[in-house]
Image (cartoon, rainbow, N blue to C red):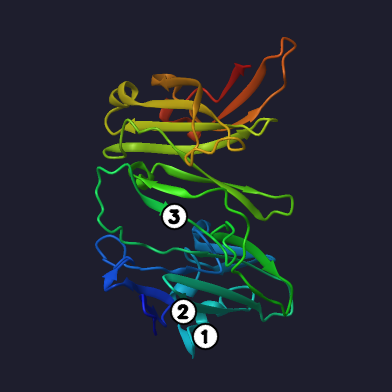
Amino acid sequence: MKLTNDIITLEVNEHGAELVSLKKDGREYLWTGDAQYWNRYAPILFPAVGKPYNNELHVDGKTYPMKQHGFARDSEFEDLGEGRLRMKESDLSASYPYRLGLEVQYQLEDRKVEAVWTVENLDNKDAHFQIGAHPGFLLPDYNAADEIHGYVRYRDREGRPVNPVVVSSLKAGNRVPLDTLNSFKSEMPLKADTFLPRLHRLQSFDREGKPAERYFYQTEEPTQTSRNTVAYVFGLPSLAALDDGRLLVLEREVYVPKGTLWEKLQGAFTDIHIYVVDPVRDTAGILRKSLLCTFTTGALNLANFEGMCLGPVLPDGRRTLVLIADSQKGSGGLTNEYGKVILFR
């Protein structure tokens, strides 16, 4: 399918209803599907966003196969004309516990592309789903030395901020166009460090369990890699919320090298950093961090701390933060410390 106006030309593949080309004045702005890096262009994520554990869904006591980001991106769509496509029912969709229809419409307005997804519940029961967009773009005139390369902005038809990922459910027989979603906190500047894999998204939800605000958090640079290791872990295993809306963030790096037991004892360590961020009042784009505490475990007290929660307030006003470590079944005698209490004000 091809759509064009006086400014832009859009091409859509009926396989996955996926955008495969977006040109303005003959210049390509959409990712080209280079298999060396990523062989897709702009897949639609439906009815799942992300990768389920073991590629399985468990609903009402039954197990259903579900690969990463759902099946829409690998399904065939029927061209209905005027930029509209409808997903065909197939063996892929038949493996989902709910019967859902998906219609996609692309429209051109001046130099804008509007994509409207309409999800229809074809079942006789309430149906649950997720839906999201995953477009890749070519950055024109990219210069790695530039601090900011552009901005990503999500807006609805009236220009209001929207959340690009929605988690929802449909009552039996209902249809809903998903072009007006939840509010998005701010524009996201495309800085050089935005493209690092250390950038994480923190999602908040309202009282009804619907996505509300989204925040960006960047971890510190790891000191090691997973090469030549028995075990290596790096990331954010736990968060804890304070009463004033601030968050405590646990960053952890666990490193156990290959080798003899002596070499493991000499080289193994766990680095723990706990930071405070303020998503309620911080408008910097990427949350600014304040270090609360840091410590390292190693040798015979190696501790894989991966859980934390707030404990009681002491009589002198100090707060307690309880950290829990995975025993790892002892890890051959390397782990002996399983709990720690941090005191702070």
Query: Residues under labels 2 and 1: Cα distance?
Result: 7 Å
Which residue sits at x=52%, y=56%?
53
| Badge 1 density bin: few <14, some 14–19, many ≥20, Cα 10 Å | some
In the drawing, what numbered circle is on residue 152? Answer: 3
Q: Percent from the top left, x then y, of residue 223?
A: 32, 30
Tell me which numbered mark, 3 or 1, is placed earlier along the sequence.
Answer: 1
Classify residue 6 by image quadrant: bottom left
Q: Amino acid at mark 2?
A: Ser
Q: Percent from the top left, x then y, of residue 191?
A: 36, 44
Q: Amino acid at mark 3?
A: Val
Using the image, determine if residue 244 lies above or below residue 56.
above
Circles 2 and 1, Cβ within 8 Å, touching? The answer is yes
Residue 50 visible, this orientation: yes
Left or right, residue 216 beside residue 299: right
Q: Please, what secondary structure does the residue beneath circle 1 have?
A: loop
Left or right, residue 65 beside residue 243: left
In the drawing, what numbered circle is on residue 88? Answer: 1
- Out of 91 and 284, give the one closest to the viewer: 284
Which residue sits at x=47%, y=44%?
200
